[in-house]
Amino acid sequence: MKIVSWNINSLRKRQERLLGWLATAQPDIVCLQETKCTDEQFPSIDLRAAGYQSAFHGQKSYNGVAILSKEEPRDVRLALCDEEEDPQARVIAATIGGVRVFSVYAPNGQAVGSPAYAYKLKWYGRLHACLLEQEAAATDLVVCGDFNVAPKDEDVHDPALWHGAIMCSDGERAAFARLGEAGLTDTLRLHHSGTGLFTWWDYRMLSFPKNRGLRIDAVLASRAMAERCRDAGIDREMRKGKEPSDHAPIWAEFL
């Protein structure tokens, strides 16, 4: 089973790119973030023609998450476990082939100390509580997404430049690290160590050609799934070409 997470940064703008990639890569499950379309605009018919069922949770122009799968997603939930009403479409979960899969788009936080930053840390607390509950209920759990946190200095092209900044602050990194308390493992780091492995590059200043990026996307797996993870990586090729997303897909393969 190959599971991919990709912040597509506008599904309607990059639909043909997605369909072409699906035909070539043939992943089993794809978790999308920043679809930026309403549920009425979601291209479920085109995706079904491409061999993928879909579950989606969108809003106009902002946010939006989805799960695509060759099998029909079941037991779909469009919120965190606490059912707290949130106007921002940031979470969707479904069960596929016995695996509980989450696609999450964490808040950006804007600036350290801002109200948006406080919202981000609160949201992470809710996510942590939800995943603790899920881990207790099911051994097979995979949480994919744009977490808007570079977990460690090796996930940053210039740690000194980014030190204490948004996506690299101590508070955000601590919030992300707590997800490990829910039994989750960062699958990329099971197979790759060191620096230079990024999933996001600014559109400006030739950031991608210079590989001046951050790794803020991840595929996290429960203990049972992590033991079955045979490989993981980043599809840098999808950051190339005409009008790409500023993120590349990140993936993990499981036995």
Image (tube, grey):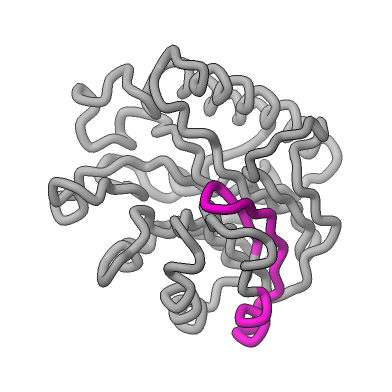
Q: Indicate yes or no whether the magenta region holds residue 57.
A: yes
Res. 86 in view: yes
249 or 227: nearer the viewer: 249
Residue 11 percent across, percent down from the top left: 50, 64
Residue stretch rendered in magenta on the structure? 44-67
Image quadrant of residue 249? Answer: bottom left
The residue sitting at 76% across, 56% down in the picture is 94
Q: Quadrant of the N terminus?
A: bottom right
Residue at left 51%, top 23%? 116
Q: Residue at x 66, y 77 (%)?
A: 52
Residue 175 image offset from top left, x and y in percent: 55, 22
Q: Is residue 63 left or right of residue 88?
A: left
The vertical placement of 86 against 239, above or below, is above
Q: Name the one closer to the observer, 170 or 153.
A: 170
Relative depth, front residue between 82 and 111: 111
Residue in the image at 47% along x and 60% along y:
10
Q: Residue furthest bottom?
A: 49
127 part of magenta stretch? no
- Asked if 33 appears above or below 87 in the picture, the reply is below
Q: Is residue 49 left or right of residue 9?
A: right
Report the number of discs: 0
